[in-house]
Image (tube, helix red, strand yellow):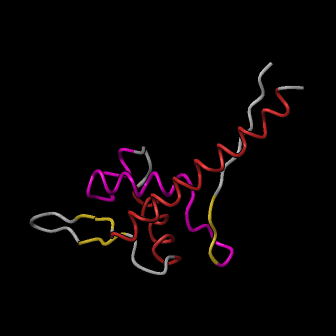
């Protein structure tokens, strides 16, 4: 039998979640869709939940992560800052490293 380790990581700031898999998925969707509303729809998430998550990320960050513009005649939008893009890359790197570490150590159980 092969065993699997299940784990999720997140990064906190002042005991509040700053980044986690769900927030990073939202940031990636914003980057792809150029809009918080479209990103929420693509993730099958309510706009309110997406806005709440994004607001929490922006408030916990040391720099702006996403810049939004209000809708109007030409529509609004949301755009990741270079800092926001760097956060995604850093989180993905940490997450992949975590999985490699866990898989490496799980071999100890699978080999028994």
Instruction: Tell me which corner region of the image, top left, top right, bottom left or bottom right, holds residue 2.
Output: top right
Question: What residue lies at 53% left-to-right and 76% top-to-bottom?
Answer: 60
Residue in the foreground of this view, choosing between 8 and 93: 93
Q: Give the image location of residue 87, x and y in percent.
A: 46, 65
Q: Magenta region, mostly helix, strand or loop? A: helix
Question: What residue lies at 43% left-to-right and 54% top-to-bottom?
Answer: 26
Residue in the foreground of this view, choosing between 31 and 76: 31
Q: Does the magenta stretch include residue 32?
A: yes
- Vertical order, 1 against 22 (above or below): above
Q: Is residue 83 magenta?
A: no
Residue in the foreground of this view, choosing between 108 and 71: 108
For this orientation, the residue located farthest to the left is 73
- Vertical order, 58 against 8 (above or below): below
Instruction: Tell me which corner region of the image, top left, top right, bottom left or bottom right, holds residue 77.
Output: bottom left
For this orientation, the residue located farthest to the right is 112
User: With 12 as the anchor, is 112 left or right in this view?
Assistant: right
| Quadrant in which the N terminus appears | top right
User: With 85 as the anchor, is 100 left or right in this view?
Assistant: right
Question: What residue lies at 50% left-to-right and 61% top-to-bottom?
Answer: 90
Q: Give the image location of residue 6, x and y in percent.
A: 71, 40
Question: What residue lies at 49% left-to-right and 64% top-to-bottom?
Answer: 53
| Quadrant in which the C terminus appears | top right
In this picture, which residue range is highlighted in magenta?
14-42
């Amino acid at each position: 039998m092969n065993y699997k380790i299940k784990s999720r990581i997140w990064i906190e700031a002042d005991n509040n979640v700053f980044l986690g898999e769900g927030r990073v998925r939202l940031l990636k969707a914003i980057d792809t869709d150029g809009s918080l509303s479209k990103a929420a729809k693509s993730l099958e998430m309510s706009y309110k939940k997406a806005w709440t998550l994004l607001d929490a990320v922006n408030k916990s960050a040391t720099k702006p992560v996403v810049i939004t513009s209000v809708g109007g005649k030409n529509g609004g939008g949301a755009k990741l800052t270079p800092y926001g893009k760097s956060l995604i890359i850093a989180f993905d790197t940490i997450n992949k490293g975590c999985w490699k570490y866990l898989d490496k150590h799980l071999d100890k159980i699978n080999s028994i």
